[in-house]
Image (cartoon, grey):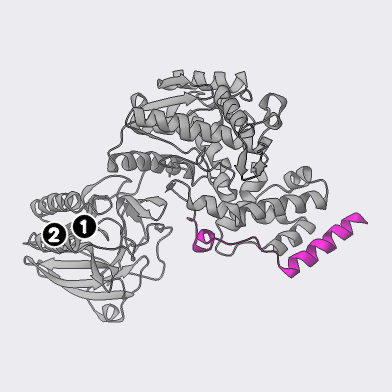
Amino acid sequence: MNTIKFASQIAIGQIQIRPEDLGYHEQQIMQIAQAGKKANIDFLVFPAFSTTGYLPKDSILFPDFYQDLQTIDQEIAAQAENITIAWGSVTYEQHQVIPTIFLAQNKKIIASITANRQSAYHRLSLDGIDLAICCSWNEPQPHPECAKENIDQLQLVFYTNPAQELIEPHKNIDSPILYLHNNGLAYEEKQIFVLPGNSKYITPASKEILSVPFGETGLFPLTTLTTPTNPPTPEIGTIYERTIYGIRSFMENNHLKKVVIGLSGGIDSALGACLYQQAIGAENVLLINMPSRYNSDLTQNLAKKLSKKLGCFYGVFPIEDSITNTIFQLENTPLTKEDAALNLKVSSFTGENIQARDRGSRILAAIAQSVSGVFTANCNKTEIAVGYATMYGDQAGFLAATGNLWKYEVYALARYMDEHIYKAPILADIINLKPSAELSPQQDITKGLGDPLIYDYHDKLLAAWEDSKTPLTLEEILKLYGQKQLGKIIGCEQRIIDNHFPTAEDFVADLERWWHAYAGIANVKRHQSPPILIVHNPPQSAHQHRLHSPYFSPKYLKLKADLLQDNAQ
């Protein structure tokens, strides 16, 4: 059978989860269960981890936490009077967290389904009507016994992977499917996933997707779900919604109110200022400009104008004297041992890092603590991928809200906010600036100088390493470059590559520079980066978390030698 005649008697319970906040989750579940009974719902289903919030499998559960959890599971089961309830919890065996779905009827648990089984089948009797349900994890996995039943069937898919969400309906299953995903945040090491939250019901005949709206909680009978009549939100609009939701939820979860942002007049900090102003209100955002001799009047004026447009507190704290004193002290204080002395010489590069650390570790940290707040990291995914940020400087902060966005997405989000949120050119002047850290004469924005990254190209190259399950190898990149097909494969206009790298030597030197950074020191920096808000894109995969050295295979070295020789002739 491929229909459920009593869909009105089935409902989704959508809650917002917080990490390990048992009482918060129980309160929401109980309220929704009471509402379900009043609405004569027969079968109420909650997503995975509804009682605990998302827990990685290697989480350590202290005995008191697990005992309280077991008590709460029994209290939820006691609500199953004249209603059947399914909810996500966990069991704890051999020091491993196992996602578990409990089914309760007549005030007691009648079944438990654990994630170490691909799928599980259970037969329910709801108000005199038999129903075969098949529970699976992350994608539909029909159970053989369920397929044999000549009664109504319902597939329940519980998401336990915070990075996964429904892309398209499953084409090979004729029975209705419920995809169940939580609202809220899921913490996985330094990644903070913004959960999509919009559980979905897919009808069998039309494969029409009916969805719970993003961010909403409560009781949702299947018959009340609708297909959105408005045009689908563009991807950048979804990124905006999830970023605002993620910032707001992270602040609330950690009982934070005030945020301090270093506002340089560049696009990353300007976008951060706008996002936090929208998420937590202008009265809670403090914008701080910290110029040195290298910061132009242009960017300083843009920072001041933006703060006025946003209605945020604003202050200017020059760092030139502090930087000069630090460099003087370093160069005029010898290090000694017995009859030897070591005199330090501060290079231009070291001077750039001193500026970044003075801003972050000295000024922003002190202001944040003075207002019982926190300060942000304004880095993006491109900078994080190659370590183009200073540890304890501009990489410091409590949260990297745009750390999951490539640089081109930073610009796209800024344009989206101007067009759809502010409906005014709040960020337009900053969008049109060449990106520059303004840390040295070589980054003088008034002379058209700026960052060493060519974002139109490097965003795409790095994504071919970072976002792909089968990253492009260096030898593949060289082959594609020689065939003038690299742009097509990575999604960059070939003319950009040709214009920026007049010779093969230029291309190879650039490729090796950023490979050394990506596969080398950037790994160390990523381990010390702030938590990153994950709103889309594949998260950092396992091979990108390991510390390792840049590798150049013999095949690559041979291809490189041949390419350079051919171009020399």
Disc ID at residue 72: 2
Q: CA distance from mark 1 to mark 2?
A: 8 Å
User: Considering only vertical position in the picture, is 409 above or below 172?
Assistant: above
Name the residue nearer the viewer: 406 or 44. Answer: 406
Q: Amino acid at mark 1?
A: Thr
Front position in the image: 362 or 40 = 362
Q: Residue at x 33, y 38 (%)?
A: 248
Does residue 131 appear in the picture of this structure? no
User: Amino acid under label 2?
Assistant: Ile
* Whole-percent x, y for residue 482 in the image: 79, 58
Residue 405 rendering spot, x and y as whole percentages: 51, 45
Q: Which mark is residue 500?
A: none
Whether residue 439 appears in magenta in the rendering, the answer is: no
Percent across and percent down for residue 36 are 13, 53
Question: Contact, CB < 8 Å: mark 1 with mark 2?
Answer: yes
Residue 234 in sight in this render = yes
| Pointer 1 local density, CA inside 10 Å: few below 14, some 14–19, many at least 20 | many
**Residue at 51% from the left image edge and 38% from the top image edge:** 393
Asked if residue 240 is positioned above or below residue 504 in the image, the reply reads: above
For the N terminus, the image quarter is bottom left
Residue, disc 1:
51
Asked whether residue 559 is drawn in magenta, I would say yes
Range shown magenta: 540-569
